[in-house]
Amino acid sequence: MKAPRRAVPAGASPTLIAALRGLIVAMATAVVGVTGMLTFISVRMARKVVTPGGRLPDTKILDVDTAAQTITLTRTPDTVLPGRYGLFTVGTAAYLKLGSVLSADETSVKRKLLTHVGPDAQLAPDAAFSGWYFDQPEELHLPFSVELVGSPVGPCPAWIFPAAEPSDTWVVQVHGRGTTRAECLRAVPVFHAAGLTSLVVSYRNDGEAPRSRGGAYGLGATEWRDVDAAIGLARRRGARRVIVMGWSMGGAIALQLALSSAHRDILTGIILESPVIDWRIVLSHQARLLGLPSQVADLAIGTLRREWTTPVTGADVAIPFDRLDVVSRAAELRHPILILHSDDDGFVPSDASHDLVVARPDLVDLQIFDVARHTKLWNYDQERWTAAITGWLTRTGQVTPAV
């Protein structure tokens, strides 16, 4: 006769059996708990990515010397950068222009104020350091008009800065995530000097253009249609050649236009400043910065790409990450591309920019900076930034070189 099979060794004590069962239950509970926590964090990350939000403070005002017209900020990788910048503040002034670094130590940075601050000014400590510099179109001292672009979501505000002489080559500029048209103003004088008309546009859910049905970002997958309508306006106004310039997420929008625009026949080039070229790389980078496991970014991406999870994430539509990955779609590109990116970009890593030039060296010109951070390349080295764009415009035949 065969001995009966046993779940535990013969002679095992009831205490050992109970301990083993308790260990198994504890391990299963821990696995469920960890999985649940990762899922919760990933959903929060997914919602944050597609939810438009206000500008968040990233530095503190430590001192304002109104006699010397200087301001001291907490030191960050951004506030210590050389060059000219902006500072969003709360109090008697909403925005200040900042000049060069006068001194710095391990915890603070003193900069020259380029916006006068009076002795009675009251500013809250929290502030946001910015690469905008110009925050109103009038500050460029160039003629411009205010326009409304008829888009799929309604009228989107835009600025047109006409060329000094009639020109049928236009530049359509597209700002990034969490910001507005003013981000693009730094580039307008460069194109004006080259004899080009600039159209600086807004798009759904950016705080200036109309809100979409759900009010969420499509990470470029939906916004490009609003910008395509702006290209249509330029065409109706006489544009026969259009260059699209995209900043950060505006780069993702510009690349979707290069692949899908109804006006691709008049697109002649793409300029990308600190661009998002593959969102998966960006989200994985952000997870690492937050000290989160890599699974969180993977779960967030998986959640955002499914239609049935949109009520959970708040997204209008499922995010098509494969379609937004332009490195994998590089063979479809047809227009010359200039990329300006810094290798120390703390928000959108430059990996995909390097990958794209490897994939399409025939089309892509990559200009790499070392310490200019995110969308602050103009601020850090205006001369080099301007020369890179004007040189590319000439080399690709967008403008005729001056004689």
Image: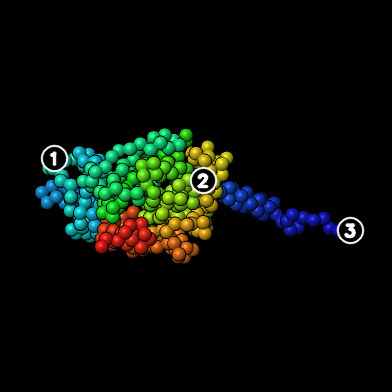
Given the image, on which type of amino acid does mark 2 rest? Ile
Q: Residue 278 or 184: which is nearer the viewer?
A: 184
Spatial CA distance of label 3 from label 1 is 100 Å
Residue 254 locus on image (x, y percent):
42, 50
In the rendered view, tell whether residue 169 sits above or below residue 392. above
Which of the marked residues, 3 or 1, is nearer the chain's N terminus? 3
Residue 274 at x, y percent in the picture: 37, 55
Is 209 located above or below residue 26 in the figure? above
Question: Which numbered marker is on residue 120?
Answer: 1
Check disc 1: other Cα within 10 Å, few if <14, some if 14-19, many if 20+: few
Question: Residue reaching furthest left?
Answer: 67
Residue placed at 34% from the left, 54% from the top? 375
Judging by the rendered image, the residue that carries numbered circle 2 is 319
Q: Amino acid at mark 3?
A: Met
Circle number at residue 391: none
Q: Toward which corner of the image does residue 345 lie, by quadrant?
A: bottom left
Q: Quadrant of the N terminus?
A: bottom right
Q: Are marks 2 and 3 in contact (CB under 8 Å)?
A: no
For marks 1 and 2 on the same chain, the one whose residue lies earlier in the sequence: 1
**Residue indicated by mark 3:** 1
**239 sits left or right of 62 in the view:** right
Q: At x 21% / y 46%, what residue is drawn? A: 141
Determine crowd level at label 3: few under 14, some 14-19, many 20+ residues with C-alpha closer than 10 A. few
Q: Secondary structure at mark 3?
A: loop
Between disc 3 and disc 1, the foreground one is 1
Mark 2 vs mark 3: give the one in front: 2
